[in-house]
Image: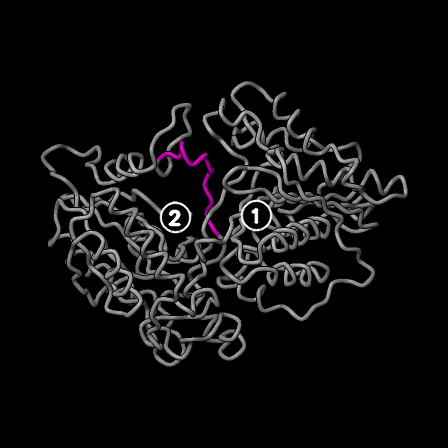
Amino acid sequence: MTGSAREFVVEADGGSRGNPGPAGYGAVVLDAATGETLVEAAEYLGVVTNNVAEYRGLLAGLRAAGELDPDATVHVRMDSKLVVEQMSGRWKIKHPDMKPLAAEAARVFPPGRVTYEWIPRADNKHADRLANEAMDAGARGEQWSPSTSTAELDARAADRAAPAGRTAGSRRSEDRATAAADGRTAGSRRSGDRATASPASAGEAADVAAAGGHALPTGEHLPRTTTRTGAGSAVSGGAAAGGASRGGRGEGDGGEAAVSGGGAIAGERVSRAARTGAGSAVSGAAEAPAAADVRAAKAVASPGWGPPDMGAPATFVLLRHGETPLTPQKRFSGSGGSDPSLSPVGREQAERVAESLARRGTIEAIVASPLARTRETAGIVAARLGLAVTVEEGLRETDFGAWEGLTFGEVRDRHPADLDAWLASPDAEPTGGGESFAATATRIAATRDKLVAAYAGRTVLLVSHVTPIKTFLRLALGAPPESLFRMELSAASLSAVAYYADGGASVRLFNETSHLR
């Protein structure tokens, strides 16, 4: 990512009156910093399913964003759980009509530059109204025209008419209860996204990106779009609502191994002047980002509810290294492979996390895995904090044996029986004598005990990898081994665990990436 690249939010939707039935999509591209509407796109599709219409809306939004700036980073917000989970790599794509659309969407921007977030339908009014305008136009035998669109004005009016205290970006529970009736014209249908989707095996996101080569169905029209250059933000009441904005943005995972998962955990975005610390609510009063960072970090590092004679905990701030050339390709990259260094993106990520940790001012020591990518990440942070780096062998990544450098799909093709065994049991080793998850857990538990004893009462940055960090968290939570496949861990993300004198542990932070936005 370059300093001049723009950040966009794409909100997209699709609907089918009959499923399959007369269908249309809507998409809007927003400026991530201001919430200004930049492009609207909508199209009547004829008779297709609701899910196909949603994918067509996603594709139109991504293409419109790419035309504005092909080097941009994009955060997609949709109320389709199916599309979000499939494009994030967590659910399989089985339907033959959706596979080529998903593959085409994955090719619009390079891997790692697009992230996905599910939002309630009540927060997707603008795209929803565009989709309904397209379907209404189709019912009249016409195509949607940007010159007659009132979708943005209608969305603003709906936001103003919402109950007091509720803004376009709010996440109140009644959104879910009323979503089925909100913003839809009579006869519009939403198909059972959740009932028809099946969970993906770990690493399925790589298959989505690799499923290319499919052209779009013949006879499809290019989306009709309109570009907004003047005023006309899709955000209403931003100042009165404490700076809340429709456009959230998370950071893509770019998974390191099959256990890294795909997609992003995206938080609510607030105006740059009013962004608070991780996990805090948006308030009416603006707070300087640096002050919020310090306040949040001190809360993470502070003692818990235990008795005062236990003393301060040893707090491990767990930093996953920045991206390497293998990260966006989602290839197995453990301790037995090529030991890649950081990519330019990874070095920038390390610099950003270094600045964030410097503002917080709570790190007292740095310990890193011996691999090149972690030592390089730790070195960048250490130079900014004025600390030395201690190398700890126990923090290295799992050895993936013969799978090193391969994608999940390639492993499945070459070693299907070994892969099935590995997914089913923590005691199974990767092909060629790699390290099992059970062996990794034993190593991490011993390393944890050693470091807790050495750094009692201090806050230490541990720079490590996907599997070790997830294992620290799993052991702290007492979760089963299969939980490794159910955690999202982005490159250059921060997590934190506090360890007390009585042997108790408290997970304080998980996959925090606000410093990368």
Q: Residue furthest left?
A: 309
Does the residue at mark 2 contact the one at mark 1 (Cβ under 8 Å)? no
Q: Secondary structure at mark 1?
A: strand
Magenta span contains residue 13 = no
Q: Could you tell whether 243 is left or right of 278 in the image?
A: right
Disc on res. 76: 1
Give the percent coordinates (x, y) of residue 383. Answer: 21, 57
Front-lying residue, 130 or 22: 130
Give the percent coordinates (x, y) of residue 238. Answer: 52, 27
Give the percent coordinates (x, y) of residue 315. Answer: 20, 46
Give the percent coordinates (x, y) of residue 466. Answer: 36, 60
Q: Residue furthest front?
A: 230
Disc 2: which residue: 513
Quarter-of-image position of residue 500: top left
The magenta region covers 264-276
**Lower sequence index among marks 2 and 1:** 1
